[in-house]
Amino acid sequence: MKKIFLFIAFLWISLVSFAQDGVNFEHLSFREALDKAKSEQKYVFMDCYTSWCGPCKNMTQNVFPQKKAGDYFNPKFICVKYDMEKGEGPELGKRFEVRAYPTFLVLDAEGRLLHKVIGSYSVDEIIERIEESFDEEKAYGSLKAKYESGNREQVFMVKYLKMLIRYYDPAMEAVAAELINTLSDKEKVEEAYWFVFSNPKLTPEGSANEAWLLKNHKRFNKTVGKEKVEQELDKRYTEKLLKVLSQKEKIWTEKQLTALGREIAALKLNTNEELQAYVTVAKTALKKGVEELISVCETEFPKFKTKEIPYIQFCDRIVAEASPADRARYIALGEKLYAQAKDEPAKNTFKFVLEYLKHHNKQN
């Protein structure tokens, strides 16, 4: 009994010591934190979190209590944390444009933003990222100030734009457009700018950037590599065709689908057969009855790399329009595709959808 008591006491002391050695987060208002930072000649480190954020909890429970974290943060910073949904949190979140959690802010004693870091990291990683606050070539505040003061050098613009992407800053779209407009056609296909054309936020469907990418994709083959370019084009057309199948954004006509198929064929992608299978299914869904749709799905779905998402698209229609026998055919197709699925998320999706279909087939 005595040994057990000593073990528990040792464990408790170790846990308390672990917590005390870590980052010292103080219960201060924002104004108090700035005043204390000023009086102690320190910076402010602010943890912006929410109660439901899993990565936030990981940092709180596993990273900040470490001695290495305490040794780094405590001498340099007044450390505070605010729930972004309570108290001062919403106002601070708006002021410092906090859009994701956790977000960590480094401020000077006047409340000026020096740097921000988003996400969950190991202790070494978070220290490395916070150290960027004191490097004017990496710090968020420094780069933003240079941009606002008029720096438009291409090398700087690339660096600034990548930082905006990293922080989910909506200003990235305007900055990307500004950057691309300064480039010649020869410069646009350089590998240094591929990150713009391969980013769906900066080169969205139907944009001038996408039109330029599609028209000049062969030129990118030489600078970026054919495989990487084809992967990007395949991803774009697959996403577009999945939207076509869902019919949520707009209703496509047969003429438009035929034109889309020709557009894809002209690119001569290695995945042309798969993409044309999407077009075939979309045309059938548009014109034919549910019995023929199931027949085409049986032929074309096995050609898709990702099978569970197309399969889901027609579930409600199958339930509403198909006979019990045709529902059974669609269920059998789903079970076949489930057996071919290689990852757990895909298998789980098929399980859920198949249960839904079987439930409705029993009721009818």
Image: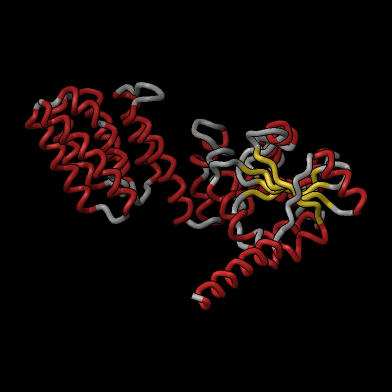
Q: Residue furthest left?
A: 325
Residue 50 in which image quadrant: top right
Q: Nearer the viewer, residue 14 or 4?
A: 4
Q: Residue at x 25, y 31 (%)?
A: 314
Q: Relative to 243, say whether 268 is above or below.
A: below
Residue 114 lies left or right of residue 51; in this view the side is right
Q: Nearer the viewer, residue 286 or 51?
A: 51
Residue 317 position within the rendered picture, expressed as x and y whole percent measured from the top left:
22, 26
Is residue 273 at least partly visible in the picture? no
Q: Residue at x 13, y 42 (%)?
A: 332
Residue 61 in which image quadrant: bottom right
Q: Nearer the viewer, residue 17 or 60?
A: 17
Q: Nearer the viewer, residue 267 or 74?
A: 74
Count how many numbered circles sit on residues in the image.
Answer: 0
Residue 230 position within the rendered picture, expressed as x and y whole percent measured from the top left:
43, 50
Residue 263 position within the rendered picture, expressed as x and y whole percent measured from the top left:
38, 36
Residue 312 in which image quadrant: top left
Residue 301 lies left or right of residue 210; in this view the side is left
Q: What's the image's color scheme?
A: secondary structure
Q: Residue furthest front?
A: 1
Q: Relative to 156, say whether 66 is above or below.
A: below
Q: The C terminus is located in which quarter?
A: top left
Is residue 223 at least partly visible in the picture? yes
Q: Residue at x 28, y 31 (%)?
A: 282
Q: Residue at x 85, y 44 (%)?
A: 34
Residue 91 position within the rendered picture, expressed as x and y whole percent measured from the top left:
72, 31
Residue 82 lies left or right of residue 204; in this view the side is right
